[in-house]
Amino acid sequence: MSEVTQNRTFFGRIAANPTPALIWLGGVLLLLSVEFSAFVDALILFGEQINPLVGGSKDIGGWYVDTMYDSLGFAGGTVMSALGALVVLAVFSVFVKAAFIPFSIVERLGLEDLPISADLLERSIVGAFLVVLWLVLLYEPLAFLPALPLIGEPTLAQMVHGFAQTMAGIADWVVANVPTLLSRDLIPNQGFNPPASAASEYPAGSEILGARIAIGPYHGTFLGLSPAVAWAIRVVAIYLYAFVWLVWVWQGYKTFRRHYRFADWTPRDDMIDRLSTHRWGQFGFVVVFLFLVLAMFAPAMGPTTTAQNIYNPYGHEFQYVEDGEVQTITHGTANLQSASQGTPDNNVGVMNYDDYGRFHPIGTLSERANGKDLFTFMADGARVSLFIGLLSIALSGFIATALAMVTAYYKGLADLIVVVTSDSIQALPGLLIYILLSVVFSSHPISNIYSGGFLLALIFAATGWPALWRAIRGPAFQVSEEEWIDAAKSYGQRPSATMRKHMLPYVAGYLLIYGSLTIGGIIISVAALSFLGLGVAPPTPEWGRAVNIGRPYVTTVSWHIATIPGLMVVFVVTGFNALGDGIRDAIDPQSEGSGAGESAAAGGGG
Amino acid sequence: MSKQAMSESQSTVQAEPMIQVRNLKTYYPGGGLINDEPVKAVDGVSFDIKKGETLGLVGESGCGKSTLGRTLVQLEDATAGASRFQKPDVVERMANSYGRRTVDLREVYADNDATELVTKLFADGVQPKAVAPDRGWEDVSASEIDAAEFVQQTGLAVSDVIDQGFGPRLGLFGEKDFIFIQEGRIENGVYEVERGYIDVTAAPARALKRLRGRQLGIVFQDPESSLNDRMTVGEIIREPLDVHSWGTPRERRERVRELLETVGLRPEHYYRYPHQFSGGQRQRVGIARSLALEPDFLVLDEPVSALDVSVQAKILNLLEDLQTEFGLTYLFIAHDLSVVRHICDRVAVMYLGNLMEIGPTDGLFENPGNPYTHSLLSAIPEPDPSAAKDRITLRGTPPSPRDPPIGCPFSTRCPVKIRPDEYQHIDDDIWQRIEVFREVIRERTRADRSLTDHARELLGRSTRFSDVTEITDELFGDVDVPTEVAEHVREASSFVEKGHDNKAREYLFDQFGSICDTDRPKHYSVSDDGRTSFCHRHVDRYEDPAPEFEKLKQKR
Ligand code: SF4
């Protein structure tokens, strides 16, 4: 490569040879478009969960702005509000940039030759992004929108509000009108086999883009196939779709490597090579992948929806055939009749239909849980587990990393303080703390977010960071002894930049390892708490509660209620641990096999 | 410098030093349970490095040469003393941004009186020889002399007192002042500096950051560890440029490519990782990084010791070329004497945190002054194996830097150590054995002991170390020991038997100690090109080291 092309920025290189990048981007757009409204829907859902937090920040901000206007009048109030917003924004963007963005956005975007300080530009970009994110979350459409009580006149805030509402309207319209490939609208699995007398009234098959094609006799199901087959087709299609994404992302990486990366070799290549021969790690990856897809596509996964199954079973009706007649019944009533109670008469087991022609891939729950469909319960429960697991790992990982950097760089007193703090936290009996805190906060509004899941995540983060910090403290100290840290000091590099550039990349891998080992522990702990009747409040599904509900029936025909969720917990936790092992061996080939005891400890240490 | 290059470079070397080190000490805090004496890695050294010069720093490993180098670029904090950087334009720039930390030395000179200052110092317990080094006051204690007389006889001025680093101690300026102006003007609050210096050891972090990379730099020994292997070579070399916001990012990338060529690599290596290079190439990357901002002064911390012999010469040549091209000033730290002889204008020999000898390279190698230099040089393998050469093998190991000898740092191993007058007549062989005996006792007091051993010793019980009769038998069993010596040895042994190793050590010190044990030597001029050596033997009363070594050789 000539020197001229070598001096291009990343975007410059793409501009010089756009074809491979465009092909790849086209693929991404195609994949996105078939599921576009599902993605928008997910965004809205995400916003809904985060909304109370953002709303809280708005309350504080509103109070500040009000006070300023009250005491300083219009001009002073405006100036002070703007100033306050600027300060908050500056603090946040500096923090977010330092903590979460290890590369230079300006360089990646090829903006580095603009006649303005690169640092300032970088932080402005981050700041702008934060503002947009905050606004989107704050004025998120499906949440309750309080009128902005700032001032009577049309203000900037109200304009923003209006804009956000317009956006929200668009989002709602998209969700309502744009079809997605993998929805239950396109591949429905709820229907019945009409009696001959009513065959003309209830034609076979479902409408696909206005046309009705039928292979089987069922009314309302995909191609008139039986509910079980239609459901299976949908699940397989979803996994295929996710798999295609995976392949395409990998393809993107290869395209980047082949066409746009100058380095013909990087240390990461070796890691990927090692991971690609690590069978145990790959097994873990597959399990985690299955789990993630289950959680992400939960609404389309279940044979029935959460609204029908869990949250409002008496508000939804369906039709079935009894005594040669088509009848209508609510899901709630039908569920109660199909509960698995441990006797052959009262049991809907694995791969069975109930008396109302509904298919239950892994049976139903007991009467205590109103005979809900277990698979739908588990799919939605996977979301809860994943949400709590990821959030608490992200929080405790962030705390642990920040502390590990600081303690390893400054050593001495800083280290001692953190050692004492973390020891004190680790000395507390975990389960007792969870129980205590969930009781203390039970009437606090925070415990309503995600049925208490958010609070659980916070508790796990607050009690979990010491273990993570301990685990990465060693590698952090090791890298802090390297001479390149001294070298960075010798040409005047700032400590924070030294930590980020010269220490963090070495510790990040270990964080990934211990993170994936710990997340299994958290999933187990959440399940254990739900098993004890604590933690996530019903009716929000949680795997541990399913085990608890099924406990009396383990030795009966209704064994599936407790056994399948229990096995799934074990399977997922093993998967995360295996993935962690794989990553460790990829990052640090010398350690192979030596860390087995360690990983078991971390996995079980929830 | 090679020989031809040397004559050139000497003409360009200016009289004004770029680096002035004064009484520099770097101690590491102790922290042991029993022994929390600090490790005295650098224990009071003073020297100058002139602009454009290469000063070699040699010594055995653990002598503190690396610590000294790292202290000069403030990778270690100095415990005491000063390291001064002199370059008028830099001092001027600093003075204009740190006006409150700037001292106009001429005012200080005018406002103070040397006699008053010296009186204060003497009252403070400072010895005359420390106030006026190299002027022959080593035998006089502060109480014996009147300050006024002393100032008059030595011609001491306020500037000399400050030059010795007594400024902060006397309160002539604040502890935090670090910019000193000797000649210059101040107009409307703007400094114009013609002569002055920055005390790097006192500079605050922000000021240091500005000096680092641009004025002070360091090349590390191990290119494995000094390059972050998750970054490409280009990113590594570019980092100092980024830190100091040098040019635009595009210019920085261009500059990195230039630098790659300067150090003998290719521009397309920009996107390679350190893993893909050999040791020598990596060291080139390290050098390119240190050179990125063209610093005035570079510490080369054993830059070739980790490399193959075949590569060493190439890197050395590169360093020489770069020095000629950019007018760099080097402190070259090494343990390989032949390398030093090849590349350095002047050489400093270090032992146990002290400079033993310092001076122009050729003179030092051909006619060494200090006994330690003699011993070091005799250890160089002769290129011609047939050339008969009498090696002086040093006995034992260097003492612990936690507990250095009170007198000459080399006194525990010196082959030509001065004997006390009353033992002059004793046979050399027996004297040798006495020294060994003292060394053994000293080692015992140093040895790591468990708390139980300490407790036993305090209780006067015997410890696992009490096999002293074996030692004395071994040492003195087969020779005829004069009675007075035998007496003292027996006395010392009895202390050891009772477990009082320290008492035995002190007893032997009192009986057999000479001026080398009791008094710190000072630097004496040993040649007319300004070489000085740290040894009592240069005083007229004693025989010079060189003839003593001749005698030693003849005996064998
Ligand atoms: S002072 Fe004494 S011990 Fe030290 S080098 Fe000179 S002769 Fe040897």
Image: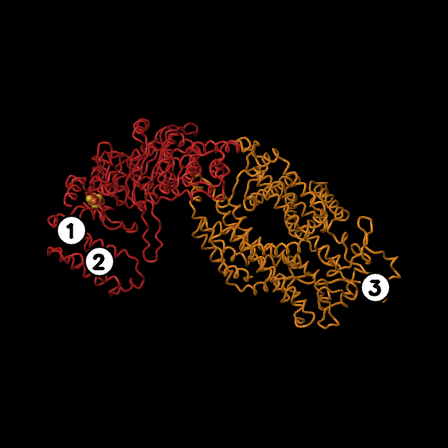
Chain colours: A orange, B red
Which residue was labeled with disc 1? B431
Which residue was labeled with disc 2? B503
Which residue was labeled with disc 3? A321
Image quarter of residue B388: top left
Question: Decide: marks 1, 3 in contact (CB < 8 A)?
Answer: no
Q: CA distance from mark 3 to mark 2?
A: 107 Å
**Residue B143 appears in the picture as rendered:** no
Helix, strand, or loop for circle 2? Answer: helix
**Residue A553 appears in the picture as rendered:** yes
Chain assignment, label 3: A
Badge 2 density bin: few <14, some 14–19, many ≥20, Cα 10 Å: some
Identify which amino acid the numbered label 2 is placed on: Lys
Question: Decide: marks 1, 2 in contact (CB < 8 A)?
Answer: no
Badge 1 density bin: few <14, some 14–19, many ≥20, Cα 10 Å: some
Badge 3 density bin: few <14, some 14–19, many ≥20, Cα 10 Å: some
Chain assignment, label 2: B
Image quarter of residue A288: bottom right
Which of the pair A98/A357 is nearer the observer? A357
The x, y position of residue A90, in whole percent, is 58, 42
Identify which amino acid the numbered label 1 is placed on: Trp
